[in-house]
Amino acid sequence: MALRVALPNKGQLAEPARAMLLEAGYLQGAGQRDLVVQDPINDVEFFFLRPKDIALYVGEGTLDLGLTGRDMLLDSGAEAEELLALGFGASSFRLAAPAERIRVLADLNGTRIATAYPGLLESWLSRVNIRARVVRLDGAVENAVALGVADAVADVVATGTTLRRAGLVPLDGVILESEAVLVRRRQAPQSVTIETFLRRLNSVMVARSYVLMDYDIPTGLVDQACGITPGFESPTVAALHDPQWSAIRAMVPKGEVHRVMDDLYQIGARGILVTDIHACRL
C-alpha cells in the first residue's frame, strides 16, 4: 500500500514544503493546482490539505505522515506527534497588546485575548495561572483590539510587522517557537517507506546546510588542515603529482564557509573551491 502524505495547500508553508519534496525526488511533474498527486515510482500518494487539518487526518490514521507547523500540531490536540523538524517556516506564537493598556503578563488577568490557536493559548494560560477569556477567531487576529472584540491578541508571527501596524506591541516572552515539522500518528509502526521518506528529507536539509570544500595544502600541514575541516566522517586526502602538496575534500557548514577559507589560507592552503551539494546520503 502506498505511503499517504499530507501537504499544506496554502499559507507560508505551502511553497517551501513543495520545494523540499521536489528536492527529495518527489512530486515530479505535479501541477500547482493538484489536490491529490500519485507518485507511483516512489510508492507515495500526496494530499494537499488545509494546514490546520493535517495533524487531525494524521492523528486519526487516515494518512501516514503530514507536513504542518508545530503550532498547528499542538493546537489541534490530535493524536499525532512530531517526527522531524524541517528547518523552514520559523515563527513565534506570542502575545501582543496596546502598550498603554497592557505592559506585563500579569495585566492580562481579566482581559479578553483573541487568537486563531485557542488550544495553544488555553494550555499556556493554565500553566502560567492567568485568568483571561479566549476569543476564538479564524484570521485577521491583529484587528481584534481595534474592533473592540478583545483587549490583547495571541498570534503566530514571523517578524511582528503586522502587529505593530495594528498598534500592538509584543509582550515579553514567547509561548511557542514554531517551524515546519513532519508528523505521524502516535505509536504508529515504522515502515521501510517511512524510513526512506525521512532519509530523503534529512538529506535535503543536510544538502542545504553544507557545501563541499576542495583545496590544496602542503603535505606537512595536512593534519592541521584536517583539524579546520574535519568533515562529516573524515576528510578525503589525496596525493598530488607534486609530493610536497596534497588535496583535501570535506563537507563544511554553509554558514562557516568564509571563516574556514580564511583559516585555511592563513596556514598555507591554496586553490580553495566551494561547491553546492544538491543531494546526499549520510
Image (spheres, rainbow, N blue to C red):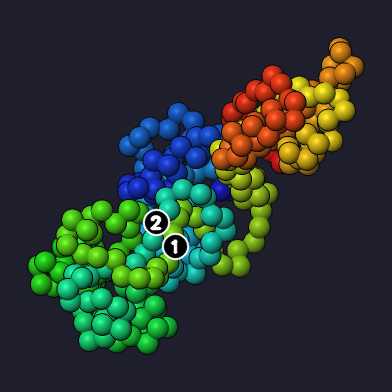
* Residue 177: mark in rendering: 1
Give the spatial CA distance, label 2 vs label 1: 6 Å
Residue 222 pos. (x, y %): 83, 31
* Residue 282 drawn at (x, y percent): 71, 41
Q: Secondary structure at mark 1?
A: strand
- Vertical placement of residue 24 versus 198, above or below: above
Q: Which label's residue is closer to the chain start, 2 or 1?
A: 2
Observer-nearest residue: 18 or 226?
226
Q: Left or right: where does residue 156 sit relative to residue 56?
A: left
Q: Amino acid at mark 2?
A: Ser
Determine the residue positioned at 38% across, 32% down.
Answer: 31
Quick one: 83 or 212, which is closer to the camera?
A: 212
Q: Which residue is mark 2?
A: 91
Question: Vertical placement of 196 versus 112: above or below?
Answer: above
Number of numbered tags placed on the structure image: 2
Looking at the picture, how far across and down is residue 274, in whole percent?
62, 26
State left or right for residue 121 relative to residue 62: left
Give the percent coordinates (x, y) of residue 219: 86, 25
Assign a secondary structure to mark 2: strand
Query: What kind of residue is marked 1?
Result: Glu
Q: Is residue 240 above or below residue 90?
A: above
Q: Residue at x 52, y 50 (%)?
A: 86
Seen from the viewer's position, the closer of residues 261 and 31 is 261
CB atoms of marks 2 and 1 within 8 Å: yes
